Image (tube, coloured by chain):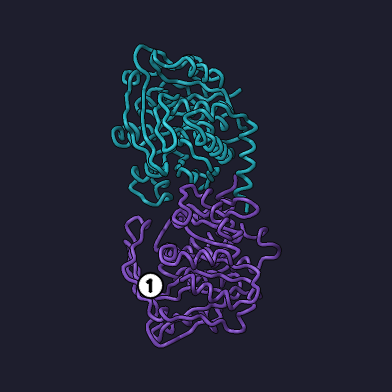
Chain colours: A cyan, B purple
Amino acid sequence: MSSVLIVGSTALDSIKTPVAENPRMLGGSASHAAIAASYFSLVRMVGVVGEDFPKSYLQLYKRRRIDLEGLQIVPGKTFHWSGEYEANMNNRRTLATELGVFENFTPALPVSYQGTAFVLLANIAPSLQHHVLDQTLRPKFVVADTMDLWLNIALADLLKLLKRVDGFVLNDSEAQQLTQEDNVFNALRKIHQLGPKFVIVKQGSHGSILSSPEGIFLCPAYPVRNLVDPTGAGDSFVGAMMGYLSTARGSIEKNIRQAMAYGSVVASFCCEGCGVTRTARLTRAQIESRMKELRELTRF
Amino acid sequence: MSSVLIVGSTALDSIKTPVAENPRMLGGSASHAAIAASYFSLVRMVGVVGEDFPKSYLQLYKRRRIDLEGLQIVPGKTFHWSGEYEANMNNRRTLATELGVFENFTPALPVSYQGTAFVLLANIAPSLQHHVLDQTLRPKFVVADTMDLWLNIALADLLKLLKRVDGFVLNDSEAQQLTQEDNVFNALRKIHQLGPKFVIVKQGSHGSILSSPEGIFLCPAYPVRNLVDPTGAGDSFVGAMMGYLSTARGSIEKNIRQAMAYGSVVASFCCEGCGVTRTARLTRAQIESRMKELRELTRF
């Protein structure tokens, strides 16, 4: 079976929404992406947690058959993020970020991971994304995700990274910040000039847009009627996309649209539960059922 | 050939954008909708203009073969709207509204219009939309558009209208205002309860969503790379949709998705010129070419 290597944050999230308050849930970009990818392929995870990391969360990874050889468990506290969503869930506010063991994290790739063909550099400091990429052996397809924080404090590192990856994923406000372009299609064009052949701009409930040598793809979002917690939706999207891509036969160009649609579907499940609660308990049949629906929702 | 009856505003628009300032252009919901519909079917327009209305604008309607028997030309000034778009074109601010001859307008339907099967009540005061509807003879399909102003000052009239129409079109902020629902899918459900069988929420550059007895349709927006002036895009969307629907064989259910896609395409042209300058000079071949592209842009 094919594999995806995923590096990113492995965290405890305390999230307040208008309807719920959940302390110290399993979170982080690597957790969300790995769980999403696990429905399609084997996942090799790279990250770090502290000794306070609940055993039940390790078991959850294992239930999803995620390879934890690259997950370091070290003395100290697990990265903790707490945030709050506003009434309409459109805006979120960071209340606290405690880096904990991430402060001195140097990812070391297990030998068994080094030849993985598909590499997802999920959202984490670009220097760590570089460090993981340095240890891989000629991967077939490398995608990086990011967040506004790195545009603000690590732009040079990020720009260097963009010259080393095949694909780059960011959300619309980040694309605007990076390019100073209000028009997303003009922003996409400018981001290609920074390096990546595949650029995906995520637009939340409005779906996402791919720009590639084959042109533009407008990827729909699967309708979320009961939005509980959008945290991790973007990570789930790109995780599922990479998981599917690693198993699909044929070129990336041929498969990436369908991969993004799978990403939309898994992201929709993510939004329907707190943290990973919904995505950790999916079946492939539930995913396929929404894929079928998504085709019907967009047919004309 | 089939016909669409369109009532709405016929106006002079003075529009400031970050790149241009254009005084007293041909505008108004009926003008935009009628020109868009004219690429698909004959259009019977109902409206009123003052004696100051430029002859060249009447000639423009005629070049698009729009039936002007229902357009009153009366002493006084044509309705004049002036507005300004902010830098990113997302927000617009009304600078002045001079109702002019619209203040005492009572639409009188020419006998030749009364049996028109497809009726578009484009954005105008709900009382005028009622008045036109009163004079029709068992139309097959009636769609109403609106704007936030009528939600604020004529809600009772609008709610009565919703019980008389088959379809209702509004934008996402209006849907939220009308239903107090942040989630668009929940808003759609609530709007059905107010009467209309077909509800369409427009989301600007993010496309539009139809809710009907056949379920949800996520209609893509055609990518606009060179946004010049979005005024009238929503009117063009619904005008093209009704124009296409009036000519298509089979049920509304069967044809409305394709009709909305045509609406997206004509709306994209509208955004690429000031006022109606781009939409008034289209060819059906240009429209079909973007339809083909839109299918390719959304295929997965």
Furthest residue in direction front, as rendered: B156
- Horizontally, residue A173 falls left or right of residue A153, namely right
Q: Nearer the viewer, residue B273 or A288?
A: A288
Furthest residue in direction bottom, as rendered: B75
Counting from the top left corner in percent of width and height, residue A281 is at 57, 27
Q: Is residue B89 above or below residue A128?
A: below
Q: Is residue A12 visible in the rendered structure shown here?
A: yes
Counting from the top left corner in percent of width and height, residue B199 is at 56, 58
**Amino acid type of the residue tagged 1 in the rendering:** Asp
Counting from the top left corner in percent of width and height, residue B35 is at 52, 72
**Residue sitting at 46 percent across and 37 percent down?**
A230
Q: Is residue B167 above or below residue B27?
A: above
Which image quarter holds the C terminus of chain A? bottom right
Q: Is residue B61 above or below residue B206?
A: below
Furthest residue in direction right, as rendered: B250
**Residue sitting at 37 percent across and 75 percent down?**
B80
Q: Nearer the viewer, residue A164 or A98?
A: A98
Q: Which residue is mark 1?
A: B13
Q: Is residue B20 visible in the rendered structure shown here?
A: no
Counting from the top left corner in percent of width and height, residue A159 is at 34, 35
- Horizontally, residue A118 falls left or right of residue A179, namely right
Q: Is residue B78 above or below residue A273?
A: below
Asked which secondary structure carries label 1, the reply is strand
Q: Chain of mark 1?
A: B
**Residue sitting at 57 percent across and 37 percent down?**
A262
**Residue sitting at 45 percent across and 53 percent down?**
B176
Which image quarter holds the N terminus of chain A? top right
- Horizontally, residue B104 falls left or right of residue A61, namely left
